[in-house]
Image (cartoon, rainbow, N blue to C red):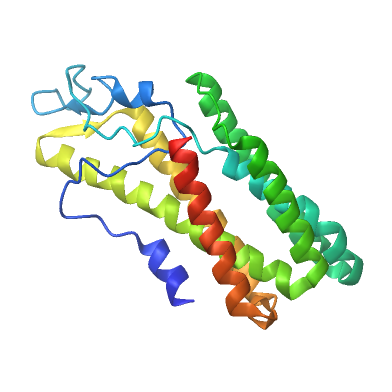
Amino acid sequence: MKTVTALRRCPLPHSYRPTSPVFDFLAPSTLRQSCRGYKSTANAPFWGKSHDASPAPDSTPSSSKPKYAGELAATLIYKAQTPQVVRSHPHLRPLMKHMYDQEAGHFSTFNQMVAKHQVRPTAMYPIWEVAATFLGWSTGAMGREAAMACTEAVETEIGSHYNEQVREILSWQAEAERRGEELDDELKDMLATFRRIRDEELEHLDHAVENDAKEARPYDPLVSVIRLGCRAAINISEKV
């Protein structure tokens, strides 16, 4: 549980890191707009904001492909797991539905975001769909503990991923404040969205641990392989 607590803390970084890739779900065109990031408030009256904008940090990810397919993959995992899990453990039906509904909401959020910016999904999208469905079905077939271990593994990686994005925006905010400027409204909304989704993903991790994820057999190989697969999927989706 120390890992979960550390992920939620997300302290404000002391330095600005302009080269770190961030916003994997967004169109690069969004990130390249010169007025995208900061608004100067140094000479603005207290009742309003200045409309003069400083250029945003150069934070275009190494890949132009969005990774919103990851949220669809999460819904497919839960969809494939649920029938098998609730068949043997009907008391878990509300929990499985709750986690599925939250993941579906995350996917809807990012689906709207990429549609707004006219982003083409990663070319690996169909493969991730099949892989996510198989992962959900296979861990569900292995039993409740394995299904929960799968959730623990996936949400650990996803929670860390969102946390990195939150840290990056906070570093921009710190840099903007140092220069007498502020983040634009879209970035502020994005920060709130990423924080909310991160916390919901880590809530799923907590539910998994509370429902005997660590009792899965074999626990260590299963979780390690799933976490490795999640990291590989993120890296590949950034490039393809």
Left or right relative to 118: residue 37: left
Q: Is residue 105 visible?
A: yes
Check the image and name the residue furthest to the right: 87
Say above or below: 121 vs 154: above
Say above or below: 87 vs 132: below
* x and y, in percent, of residue 2 in the image: 43, 76
Say above or below: 1 vs 172: below
Left or right relative to 36: residue 150: right
Q: In which quarter of the image is residue 160?
A: bottom left
* x and y, in percent, of residue 195 in the image: 44, 49
Q: In which quarter of the image is residue 220?
A: bottom right
Say above or below: 149 vs 76: below
Q: Can residue 202 be seen in this view?
A: no
Q: Residue at the location (69% across, 55% down)? A: 99
* x and y, in percent, of residue 153 in the image: 57, 65
Q: Residue at the location (71% across, 57% down)? A: 135
Q: Quadrant of residue 125?
A: top right
Number of numbered discs visible in the structure rendering: 0
Question: In front here: 234 or 147?
Answer: 234
* x and y, in percent, of residue 181 in the image: 16, 32
Left or right relative to 23: residue 60: left
Left or right relative to 144: residue 174: left
Q: Residue at the location (19% across, 45% down)? A: 174
Q: Residue at the location (21% across, 16% down)? A: 51
